Image (tube, rainbow, N blue to C red):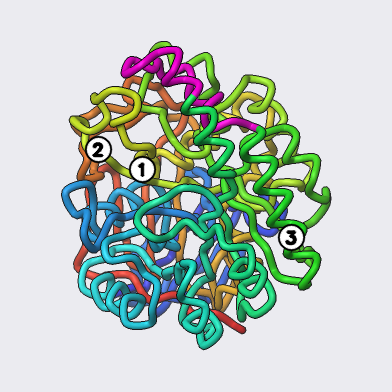
Amino acid sequence: MNDVLIVNADIVNDGRRFTGDVRVRDGRIEAVAGQLAAQANERVFDARGRLLLPGMIDDQVHFREPGLEHKGDFFTESRAAVAGGVTSFMEMPNSKPTTTDRAALEDKYARAAKKSLANHAFYMGVTNDNLEEIQRLDPRVACGIKIFMGASTGNMLVDNPATLDAIFRDAPTLIATHCEDTPTIDANLAVARAKYGDAIPIEEHPFIRSREACIKSTRLAMELARRHDSRLHVLHVTTAEELELFAPGPADGKRITAETCVHFLHFSSEDYATKGNLIKCNPAVKLPSDRAAIIRAINDGRIDILATDHAPHTWEEKLQSYEKAPSGLPLVQSVLQCALERWFDGQLPLELIVEKIAHAPARLYNVRDRGYIREGYWADLVLIDANLPHKVTREETLSKCGWSPFEGTIFRSTIVATWVNGHLGWHEGKLDDRQLGKRLEFDR
């Protein structure tokens, strides 16, 4: 039963913060008001003045299924997500096999329908030779089209100029890009190998996956988007120079938008000395000055969405040498707590964080009836105690990889409860997966 009355909540929604109650019936929000009276057969949940936010819509995760289930799968990673306040995710195509045709796309939906605690959607991936699949794509069946304009898994590096031009010309929906220039990276890696041999230190990572590689690729993507008036969304922006390329202000009406990820707000190149390969990711964590520029860009609207790029690898894989250790971090279980640290520090307004993690993803991806605490919308909600610190431990990690880059960190908030479609999937450290998430729908 999903009939719930949440009372005495500190609601943050639509640019406002106010005290109120939320009634949920049949999985949807029926009423948002002050002092609602409890009705028969309705569970009353006293929020006790804690923060009630719309659940996070994470527009970039890698849950590793199919083909890489030793790292993660839709069962484990979706539960970690819900424990972290992520109620909906959009998952990337670089699985095995890659999600580069309609059959592979529908296979992922079928898998998620059987095991994902969170709501879900999937990207169609682009290769140098699947242009016809992209041209035939129904924009309502995928959250977007993903182009790796830099080295990635298998055949997913798109470096054919004619193919890139045709994709930007013909894409029926949003194009999300990973922007790093592979020839630049290869040249930088060759220099590092010549200097260090097989013992390249992790501190070289932001110079191998360099800012120049990011800037060059982002400029190319934006040039193609402007040429064809494509709807472009540049993922995980990491450099101050790239941020200057994007327009400030509200996301609505923009044809080119940008996303960054929560670990770029938390870590900088200074952390490689202690974290090592645990924070190795592509694009790389860069300078403290880049981290400061990213926070400024969230405030002025150059960054439109805040996500995770959740990408689990096993502990053993991460302990390998620099070149052998894969790139990626498990992040969904701590994403909101990490983002809220910027609020506690006075760097980001709470209402703006909610805009970047819930409202903007819903609008920019045309997600139907989600991303807000509004009457008639699905009840995807997260309750946060901003007065209860929480220390991250390995034992509590729900991601299959079994570790967190935040291990030992004391966040100043705790995720108390998460509702997915009105179902209380997470409450005070316990999961309830008797009701699974839904396939996201798009108004396109």
Vertical order, 154 against 197 (above or below): below
Vertical order, 281 against 3 (above or below): above
In the figure, residue 318 lies in which quadrant? top left
Image quarter where the C terminus lies is bottom right
User: Which residue range is magenta in the image?
Assistant: 191-211
Q: Amino acid at mark 1?
A: Gln
Closer to the N terminus: mark 1 or mark 2?
1
Q: Position of residue 296 (x, y in %)?
A: 75, 33
**Residue where numbered disc 3 is placed:** 256
Q: Amino acid at mark 2?
A: Thr
Foreground disc of the pair 1, 3: 3
Horizontally, residue 91 falls left or right of residue 326, namely right
Image quarter where the N terminus lies is bottom left
Q: Position of residue 86 (x, y in %)?
A: 42, 54
Q: Dot 2, crowdedness within 10 Å: few (<14), some or many (≥20)?
A: some
Q: Position of residue 412 (x, y in %)?
A: 47, 27
